[in-house]
Amino acid sequence: MEMTLPITVAAATILLLSLGVLVLVRYLGRDHYLLPVTTDWLNELSADRYRPMLRLLDNADLQFLCSQEGLTPEMAGRLRRQRVQAFRGYLSLLEADFDRVDAALRVILTNSAYDRPELGSLLFQRRLSFTFGLIDIRCHILLFRCGLSNVDVSGLIRLFDGMRLELRTLLPDFSTQAA
């Protein structure tokens, strides 16, 4: 009986670590982006389209509304759910845009006449940071739904914007048309 608790804890720990590795591999190996990247798409691509995410899940707005007369707990809960749903929509778009930019950068890197190991390393680091950031954001979304946390997506938006700017500088067609 005394040995079953440590074995159970060890098994649960191994199971959780395995699940974490599977989630990480899933995010790193996903290929749902659309190619080719066009100049029109790149011209329209901006981190500004994700600016509403910065306040969408901010508890300060909800606390202000809750202090107003007439707001019922049901209304507050519905508002919280609607905001989470809108935020998840933005998050999916951000993830798809990041994947598309990442894919385009990898294609450029693969087809480059020059070996650029520093760019390959940078792309891998940013992909890893973005993936861990997504996992963190999704955990904070769960906490937000319970009223326990804000969700700060500014780091993911900065990562995306850095990748977007890198792509703009490396695309030969874009740099000649933009001039």
Image (tube, grey):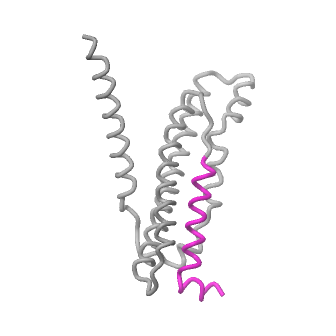
Residue 48 placement: quadrant:
bottom right
In x, y percent, where is residue 133? 52, 48
Q: Nearer the viewer, residue 16 or 146?
A: 16
Left or right, 68 with reference to 85: right
Q: Residue at x 65, y 54 (%)?
A: 51
Quarter of the rendering occupied by the N terminus: top left
Residue 87: horizontal and vertical position, in percent? Answer: 55, 45
Q: Is residue 25 magenta?
A: no
The front one of 21 and 154 is 21
Q: Residue sitting at 51 percent across and 66 percent down?
A: 122
Q: Quarter of the image holding residue 104?
A: bottom left
Count of marks placed on residues: 0
- Percent x, y of residue 76: 61, 28
Q: Position of residue 120 (x, y in %)?
A: 46, 70
Q: Is residue 78 above or below residue 107?
A: above
Q: Which residues are magenta?
A: 153-179
Most foreground residue, 98 or 63: 98
Examine the image and state in which quarter residue 81 appears: top right
Question: Is residue 174 rendered magenta in the image?
Answer: yes
Judge by depth and name the residue closer to the eye, 130 or 33.
130
Instruction: Give the left or right position of residue 157, taking residue 85 as reference.
Output: right
Quadrant in the picture for the C terminus: bottom right
Compared to residue 92, the image places residue 69 above or below, namely above
Which residue is the extreme one toward the front?
3
Which residue is at 36% across, 58% downward? Answer: 30
Majority secondary structure in the magenta region: helix
